[in-house]
């Protein structure tokens, strides 16, 4: 009996234990090469070692939950910064690389959850931010989608297949950069409209109003039109219309008003209710019932989605909330705690790595005590479009699913 127990234990350890042998061997090999006294031979072996990693797409080197960030080049200092250290705000996370003696190779070892996906950049000599030259994976980020970051993809992370363009499914129509003049706000705004293929022959459509619409539409950011095409074709959601609101000033796109418009702005809510929604429903085949109307956004837009839905549940019966910036307006918790709020559908997502999971969990407890039908997801990612885009399909299925 004792023999059988030991045999079972050995099998279990072999099945469930993590094997770091290849990780250790490759780094030990680098250390051994660095001690080769002949400089010509040493450089030749370094080039072979580096080339072997590059050919197998192993820079960064990732095994199980362990990561070796690697950089080769002349520098006085090399630092890796990204979602994992809050882009510099988390001073406790080690980010400084160590130069391997007798080489130009810099190394930083870290550990992350095996399903994590994180944005990062390399910082040379304290101020020169660059993409990882050996990593082909990138994610665009920033207000307006200004630039890419390198992307760390851990072994169990998977990209949503709904983000992939499928030429075998019907594609909806996107009407870009339409103008509306707001008397309430005192300026013009731009929006875009997604309508599913064949909408002319359909009955009136449910709709989702999307803040940060330019970014949600951008193929390198939210890529939401592709997600809608795929979900509708696969009958995972009913055909819907989507209204993407652009916070950039129409005549000066560098002036982005999102921080003003999305900060629980009552005038912005009035603009939606009294101007935008009537304007849209007059021009497109949209169901006017609140139960078929959603508001969706990320970060400050996630705060706004929550604010709109709970301030006017008679207008928005559904809300998609991604990495909400509740910390900027803590009064949102009081608004959502009102027991008189009618039942609505809520889909909320948050990242666990320097994102908004703490605040989102607090809101989750409030939703659990209410009459809301809610869904809540957490992922091992940061405050990034890589996080948000991969969950758009889940949010849409929660709100408009056919099951």
Image (spheres, rainbow, N blue to C red):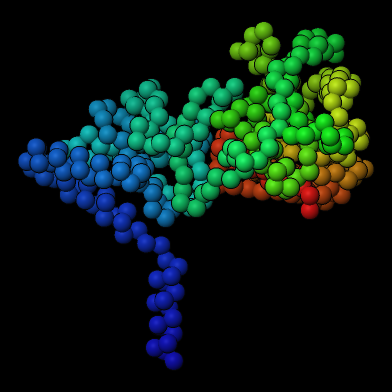
Can you see residue 4? Answer: yes
Q: Is residue 248 left or right of residue 59?
A: right
Most foreground residue, 289 or 88? 289
Query: Residue 198, position in %: x, y?
Result: 77, 34
Most foreground residue, 226 or 106? 226
Query: Residue 111, position in %: x, y?
Result: 43, 49
Q: Is residue 185 left or right of residue 30?
A: right
**Where is residue 142, by image quadrant?**
top right
Farthest bottom residue? 1
Farthest left residue? 38
Look at 14% across and 40% down and name the residue there.
Answer: 44
Look at 46% across and 51% down and name the residue there.
Answer: 155
**Where is residue 257, by image quadrant?**
top right
Most foreground residue, 121 or 328? 121
Q: Is residue 284 left or right of residue 98?
A: right
Can you see residue 355? Answer: no
Query: Residue 398, position in %: x, y?
Result: 75, 47
The answer to whether 173 is drawn above or below residue 6 in the figure is above
**Where is residue 261, by image quadrant?**
top right
The answer to whether 65 is drawn above or below residue 313 in the figure is below
The answer to whether 239 is drawn above or below residue 251 in the figure is below
Q: Quadrant of the N terminus?
A: bottom left
Look at 65% across and 28% down and name the residue there.
Answer: 217
Most foreground residue, 281 or 37? 281
């Amino acid at each position: 009996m004792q023999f059988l127990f030991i045999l079972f234990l050995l099998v279990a350890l072999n099945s469930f234990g993590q094997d770091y042998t290849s990780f250790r061997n490759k780094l030990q090999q680098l250390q051994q090469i660095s001690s080769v006294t002949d400089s010509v031979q040493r450089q030749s072996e370094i080039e072979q070692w580096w080339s072997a990693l590059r050919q197998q797409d192993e820079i960064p080197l990732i095994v199980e939950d362990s990561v070796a960030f690697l950089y080769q080049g002349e520098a006085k200092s090399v630092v890796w910064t990204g979602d994992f250290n809050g882009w510099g705000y988390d001073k406790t996370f080690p980010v400084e690389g160590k130069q391997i003696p007798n080489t130009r190779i810099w190394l930083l070892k870290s550990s992350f959850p095996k399903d994590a996906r994180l944005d990062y950049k390399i910082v040379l000599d304290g101020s020169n931010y660059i993409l990882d030259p050996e990593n082909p994976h990138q994610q665009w980020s920033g207000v307006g989608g200004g630039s890419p970051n390198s992307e760390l993809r851990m072994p169990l992370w998977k990209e949503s297949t709904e983000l992939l363009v499928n030429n075998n499914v019907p594609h909806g129509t996107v009407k870009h950069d339409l103008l509306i003049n707001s008397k309430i706000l005192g300026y013009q705004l731009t929006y875009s409209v997604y309508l599913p293929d064949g909408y002319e022959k359909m009955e009136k459509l449910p709709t989702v109003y999307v803040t940060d619409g330019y970014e949600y539409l951008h193929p390198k950011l939210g890529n939401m039109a592709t997600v809608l095409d795929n979900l509708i074709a696969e009958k995972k959601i009913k055909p819907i219309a989507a209204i993407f609101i652009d916070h950039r000033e129409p005549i000066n796109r560098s002036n982005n008003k999102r921080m003003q418009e999305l900060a629980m702005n009552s005038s912005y809510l009035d603009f939606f209710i009294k101007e935008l929604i009537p304007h849209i429903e007059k021009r497109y085949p949209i169901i006017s019932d609140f139960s078929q109307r959603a508001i969706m956004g990320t970060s400050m837009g996630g705060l706004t989605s929550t604010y709109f839905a709970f301030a006017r549940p008679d207008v928005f019966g559904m809300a998609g909330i991604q990495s909400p910036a509740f910390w900027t307006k803590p009064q949102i918790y009081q608004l959502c705690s009102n027991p008189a709020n009618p039942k609505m559908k809520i889909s909320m997502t948050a990242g666990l790595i320097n994102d908004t999971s703490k605040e989102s969990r607090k809101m989750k407890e409030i939703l659990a005590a209410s009459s809301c039908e809610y869904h809540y997801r957490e992922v091992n990612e940061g405050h990034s479009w890589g996080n948000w885009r991969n969950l758009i399909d889940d949010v849409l299925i929660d709100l408009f699913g056919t099951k």
